[in-house]
Image (cartoon, rainbow, N blue to C red):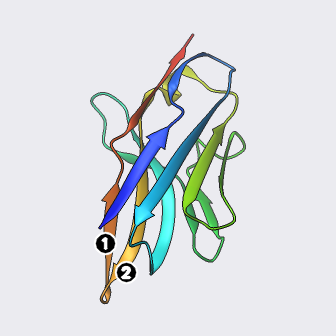
Amino acid sequence: QVQLVESGGGLVQAGGSLRLSCAASGFIASMISMGWYRQAPGKQRELVATLASTDTTTYSDSAKGRFTISTNNVKDTVYLRMNMLKPEDTAIYYCNLRKLQGVRPLDYWGQGTQVTVSS
């Protein structure tokens, strides 16, 4: 079993910054990637950024140039630094961990952390 605990959300003015953290515990061997997704009211959950076990990063178009995903040296915590925040970044941000379960990928999710950007 894998547990993901997020922190760092909050209320910030447009143009401001926040850093989200997600700490993973449990059996995280065979991890494929960790990352962040978000879901705004009335919208589907969407990818923000991922960091693969190979250190390859993926960003959504809206995150490129403003957000940076990183990890610690033991790769059990992932961070999302968000700069130049916009009101449209307002959403619940979910941490994701994907690992191999046998030959299939399996996703684990955190409880979500609210990010609100005021104009």
Q: Are marks 1 and 2 in contact (CB under 8 Å)?
A: yes
Image position, residue 69 (x, y; %): 64, 52
- What residue is drawn where x is 72% and y is 44%? 65
User: Disc 2 designates what residue?
Assistant: 100
Q: Is residue 16 left or right of residue 48?
A: right
Q: Residue furthest top?
A: 119
Image position, residue 27 (x, y; %): 38, 73
Determine crowd level at label 2: few under 14, some 14-19, many 20+ residues with C-alpha closer than 10 A: some
Image position, residue 31 (x, y; %): 46, 75
Query: Which of the 4 image quadrants contains residue 67?
Result: top right
Residue type, numbered disc 2: Leu
In this view, the residue in front, 35 or 66, is 35
- Of the residues under marks 1 and 2, which one precedes in the sequence? 2
Q: Is residue 68 left or right of residue 9?
A: right
Query: Which of the 4 image quadrants contains residue 8?
Result: top right
- What residue is drawn where x is 48% and y is 75%? 32
Residue type, numbered disc 1: Leu
Numbered label attached to residue 67: none
Q: Quadrant location of the N terminus? A: bottom left
Numbered label attached to residue 106: 1
Image position, residue 58 (x, y; %): 59, 61
- What residue is drawn where x is 43% and y is 72%? 28
In this view, the residue in front, 40 or 2, is 2
In 3D space, how far apart are the residues under numbered discs 1 and 2 (Cα atoms)? 6 Å
